[in-house]
Image (cartoon, rainbow, N blue to C red):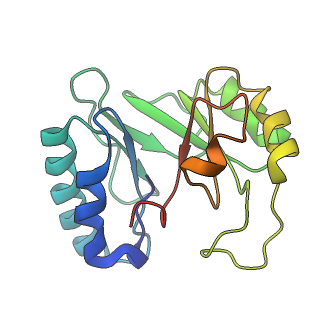
Amino acid sequence: MLTDERLGDRLWPALERLPRGSIVVFRHYGLPPAERRALLGKVRRVASARGLRLAVAGAGLGVARAGPGGAFGTHGRDPRRRPGLRTWPAHDAREVIAGMRAGADLILISPVFPTRSHPGSRTLGPCRAMALARLAPGKAVALGGMNARRFKRLRGFVGWAAIDAWG
């Protein structure tokens, strides 16, 4: 699950619905730094209590400290190796390869399908997305207009991520 301001108070029930072991990518880029840091603290506590893994996107919050089993980490295209979970966004082959070279644990390939967050944006479509997933064996996560039904159509992905599907 990727967090976003659009979730509002739906964030908390969404976190409760996630299966144990799921990954939460904390974004909330639009919040002022102090509010973002406070919200991250609350999300971190829920993630710890529920057995969720957490990756923090963007600058200004520092690297989330690795918890037991690397439960916390980062999301982004920083080529430096950081402790804990590391997720990497990719929209084309060059970005997938860069993520693999950087040692990312998971590569979020997007947008597979049209999304509400980026209306009218060009999508990869299932065929191109699956071709990119083959470049990241065992690490590809489908993102963009995803839900469980759409995920069943895809091959080569270890999982799927969403904002709206959980909220």
Taking the spot 83% from the left edge, 53% from the top edge, the residue there is 125
Relative horizontal placement of residue 111, taking residue 64 as reference (left or right): right
In this view, the residue in front, 39 or 128, is: 128
Residue 166's spot in the image, x, y percent?
Answer: 41, 60
Image position of 105 with respect to 61: above or below: above
Q: Residue at x 18, y 40 (%)?
A: 50
Q: Position of residue 159 (x, y in %)?
A: 55, 36
Query: In the picture, which quadrant includes the C terminus?
Result: bottom left
**Is 160 placed above or below 35 here?**
above
Q: Quadrant of residue 137?
A: top right
In-image side of 133 versus 74 (left or right): right
Locate residue 113: give its quadrant: bottom right
- From the top left corner, tell me how far across and down residue 44 is, in percent: 21, 49
Q: Position of residue 23 (x, y in %)?
A: 39, 41
Residue toward you, 74 or 132: 132
Residue sitting at x 22%, y 55% = 43
Instruction: Tell me how many marks there are.
Output: 0
Camera-side residue: 86 or 12? 12
Measured along the vertical axis of the image, is residue 28 above or below residue 58? below
> In this rendering, is residue 130 above or below 1?
above
> Looking at the image, which residue is at 61% across and 35% down?
79
Image-quadrant location for residue 120: bottom right
